Amino acid sequence: MNKKAGYAAIFGKPNAGKSTLINSLLNFHLSVVNKKVQTTRNKILGVLTEDNYQIIFIDTPGTLDPKYELQKFMLTEIRTSLEEADVIIHIMDVLNIDYEDLKKTEEKFSDVLAGKKRIAVLNKIDLIDKAKLLPVMEKLSAGFRYDDIVPVSALDNENVDMLKELIVKDLPESEFFYDRDTLTDKSEKFFVGEIIREKILHFYHEEIPYSVLVNINEFKERSERLVYINADIVLERETQKIIVIGKKGESLKRLGEKARFEIEKFLGKKVYLELFVKVRKDWRNNRNFIRENYNQ
Ligand SMILES: Nc1nc2c(ncn2[C@@H]2O[C@H](COP(=O)(O)OP(=O)(O)OP(=O)(O)O)[C@@H](O)[C@H]2O)c(=O)[nH]1
Ligand SMILES: [Mg+2]
């Protein structure tokens, strides 16, 4: 049988469950999931290789009207992901579908959506009465141009295999783009930064999750079993820095311990982790700073 290979972009509003779905499709934890919106900031590739097909999934940031330079960058990441894709998986939270907004999104991205296979994924079906699904599916198929509509629960892994089959069905015949053992385009260093950011999203509230950027300054193998990592936690204001450090540095210490534990599991090595908290005023509006830190 001939080989098939192609790109599938996962697209949708903040919090729809894009990252949860990609993790479930790949069966490993590629992308940060969090109940706060705007968790994903850049496109991340996850590669799934089976005997005769390879799907390269692209996790993207949630669609929104950009207010900050950071959000403009996120929007560019969405557009380039859609351009690259053979299949577009438009995921929505089944409890929270705004049809007007869906129309607007369709128009806004019409240039990059044109001519592509589009699958609507109704996510979080574990949270609704199944009888309520049919009218939603009918409305979507009557008013929008989707090739397929699939109800899933990314969290419970329900119907995720069916979705995979639908993607494969329309993949072009092609040689594989990546080696069979490649899992992602991102480096270990990127994931270490994401683990630290994930812990910050988990431990802090209010504006801190939105204002934080983690920058890995040094990532050095000291020996076969020990890695030295030095990272900056960059915030937008002095008040945020005080909160992240906490009384007598206790919050930062707890954060460092949890992050180190997770990084050790990820790398399979002992880790010496040094964290520094810095302030770069209003960095989310600083185009050059964003370029320097995100085009890695
Ligand atoms: N009950 C339920 N919750 C889900 C499901 N899928 C995702 N969630 C939850 O929804 C929240 C958002 O999930 P994410 O995967 O981070 O959403 P996202 O679309 O990647 O969000 P952004 O990166 O912020 O755009 C998390 O709390 C998930 O646990 C699902 O199928 N069922
Ligand atoms: Mg996400």
Image (cartoon, grey):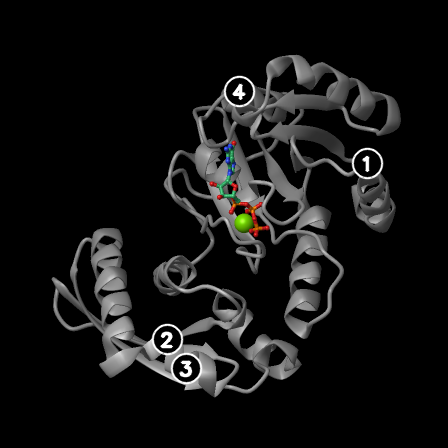
In the picture, the disc for residue 244 is: 2
* Mark 2, secondary structure of its residue: helix
Q: Which comes before the other along the chain, label 4 or label 2?
A: 4
Q: Residue at x 24, y 60 (%)?
A: 258
Q: Is residue 109 left or right of residue 153?
A: right
Q: Position of residue 282 (x, y in %)?
A: 59, 83
Instruction: Tell me the residue that label 1 is attached to.
Output: 99
Judge whether residue 172 can be spotted in this image. no
Report how far apart the C-alphas of labels 2 and 1 lie in the structure: 39 Å
* Mark 4, secondary structure of its residue: loop
Q: Residue at x 21, y 58 (%)?
A: 261
Q: Amino acid at mark 3?
A: Lys
**Circle 1 or circle 4, nearest the eye:** 1
* Mark 1, secondary structure of its residue: helix
4 or 260, which lies in front?
A: 260
Label 3 crowd bin: few (<14), some (14–19), many (20+), radius 10 Å: some
Q: Which comes before the other along the chain, label 3 or label 4?
A: 4
Q: Is residue 100 left or right of residue 147?
A: right
Label 2 crowd bin: few (<14), some (14–19), many (20+), radius 10 Å: many
Position of 56 relative to 212 (above/below): above
Report how far apart the C-alphas of labels 4 and 2 lie in the structure: 40 Å
